[in-house]
Image: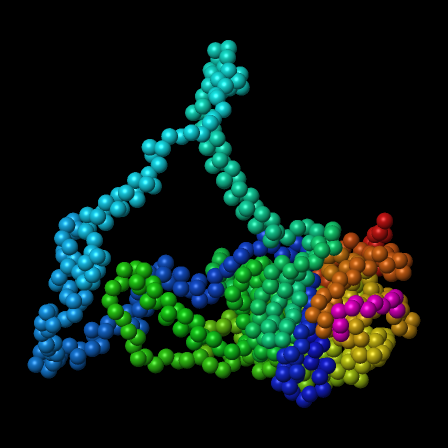
Amino acid sequence: GNKSSTILSRFTTSSVNKERSALKSEAMIAAIEWIPAGRANPTPSKYEYSRAEQEFLEKVQAGELGKEEEEDWEDVDDDDNDNESETEDQKQEVEVPAVDPKSLPADLRMDDYSDDEDGEDKVGGLLVGKDAEMMVDADDIDSDDDDSEDEDDLADVPDTREFTPLDLEGLQAMGIGGKAGGDEGYTLEDLQNMTMNNDEFNEEDDDEEEDEDDIDDIRIRDQDALILVAKAEEDFASLEINVFDTEYNNLYVHHDIPLPSFPLCLALGSVVGSYQKNENNGITAGNYVAIGSFEPGIEIWNLDVMNALEPTLVLGGMDTRGSEEEWMRMQMPLSTSANGGGKKKKKKNKKKGTAGGLREGSHTDAVMSLSWNTVHQQVLASGSADGTVKLWDCTHSTSGKKGDYIRPSATLTHHTDKVQSLAWHPSEGTLLATGGYDRRVCLADARSTDSQNVKTAKLRADCEAIAWDPHNQQYLTVASEDGVVQCWDVRKFGGDPVWSMIAHEYGGVSDISYNAHVPGMLLTCSIDKTVALWDTLNPSPKPTPCGSKDMNVGRLHSVSFYPSSPWLLACGGSGNEIAIWDVEGEDTIQKRFAGRTSGDVNVSTSNTEEEEPDFEEVMAAGDDQATTKALEGMNKSKKKKGKKGKKVHKRK
């Protein structure tokens, strides 16, 4: 899913650089995202090797590190052959004049010290000066030491402590030291051994309990709901993984990830290509998040690692090959010394290509929107302030002049201004909706990169957020800066919207979210500090308002329904705190929506049996009618579905 950041629209500056400087002194939450239940690892790991560390360890284990050192380093003796050819005649020896020891002060005449360790000879006043009264015989010093040792020795001091007499009969009655009846029992030695063993056992138990306590502290339970919070405080930015205990209504930070730049948007994903080798050539499925920021690069982090030092992947951004190679070189001398290398080494003066600038195919400005494809789960779409939309295959890296890394599979240029919002269609994996500051919302097909083959609808203000209706997937809903929310049927895209309303009159709409469990339940938020609920199931002619609430966390920038529960929502904004609202206790809302709850979260209105063409194969096809054919396919799938209805389970 995608939750677009709505921050940049709050500033009327003409460049992102000015917007960046305006935000530096403001603490705020830029974006939030719920993690569906069951997605996260219940016991996240504490650490994961970085790419450079992993490569270094592999080379050490394979014995390749020494070979690289022989190529990159050389002996000092080989480098200094000219210095070795110097003759003895060319070397000048410095002679130190002899000094008569008698001419030295008394305290510097080292020859006067005695080498005898038995201490029988006197030191001749060197240590005690010329005062005869201060001179002490070494034997006297030894005797004083012996006396002090005798004074401290308590071995001959009698023990006057009183002890309770040992009751043998009582012990035997308890089975210790032989029972009174003559049966064998436990002896005192056995009791002592038992006590010692119990102590050791207790210590082991304590260690195990401590380990269990540590694991229990980080364990994610079934009743825990996880929510990601991208926030910034002055010059520090971070991604917090918060836990909301739905049983006791407790909210706390499970762990956080420091970020190098102010975050703008988040997108959850599950399939990426990792440097960790496995049977799938490094392709792993897990709990990942893509983060867009004021930097042109996109960082993908593993949320199941608590103390991650670097992202799993970076798409675009600055070329950092030079720093990784420098880290490897720094580890080489350490490895050599550990392996017994004794020769001094110094680096060759080799000219190597230094990395710098942006990676090939990278965005050139801030990344403002992200959306991870739910059908082709390795595909990520990104929208930037540079006016482009890029599609990334997160499992496929390519080689080039600047190295081996992931490059964009396609770049779409149909927008003429910043791209604020992105959203992949829930079931048609090649349809992508985009919205920008050129006051247009567009529908593009990933199988064609031709900007002419894009359907467009005009807006009266800048686009702020986009969302597909999960229960009626032909409907695309768009929120704009002037507070208007409109919905189009994409089968007739470009014409009049199905419905239109003013959701927030003052401040505009900053984000929208559909409830995945309750058909027709739409949520909006605004910088007027409120969230509002709407019923879009039967708009006549516009959705019905169902209530609003001031969340008391400042101007709101992001809002989202919890995908694993029908009544839980969260929002965040300028107050730098998140607010969670459980609408299950709201009678007005329950009367309208409680009868619509569905047990199936992943509701899909598409039931086509045809397989979609492979994403990578058809991307470069260049079909001019790709979007039209895709929309026609959606129409056919609707007709095939017929009158099959969804079962609705009433909440008891």
Residue 554 belongs to magenta span: yes
Toward the viewer: 497 or 130? 130
Residue 110 belongs to magenta span: no
In the displayed image of the protein, which residue is found farthest to the top? 181
Is there any visible trace of residue 443 in the rendered image?
Answer: no
Toward the viewer: 354 or 395? 354
Residue 430 higher or lower than 436, as above or below = above
The scheme the figure's colours follow is rainbow
| Identity of the residue drawn at 40% across and 61% down | 57
Q: Is residue 388 left or right of residue 462?
A: left
Residue 456 place in picture, x, y as percent: 75, 81
Q: Quadrant of the N terminus?
A: bottom right
The answer to which quarter of the image holds residue 252 is bottom right
Magenta stretch bounds:
545-556
Toward the viewer: 509 or 604? 509
The answer to which quarter of the image holds residue 488 is bottom right
In the displayed image of the protein, which residue is found farthest to the left? 89
Q: Is residue 200 left or right of residue 590?
A: left
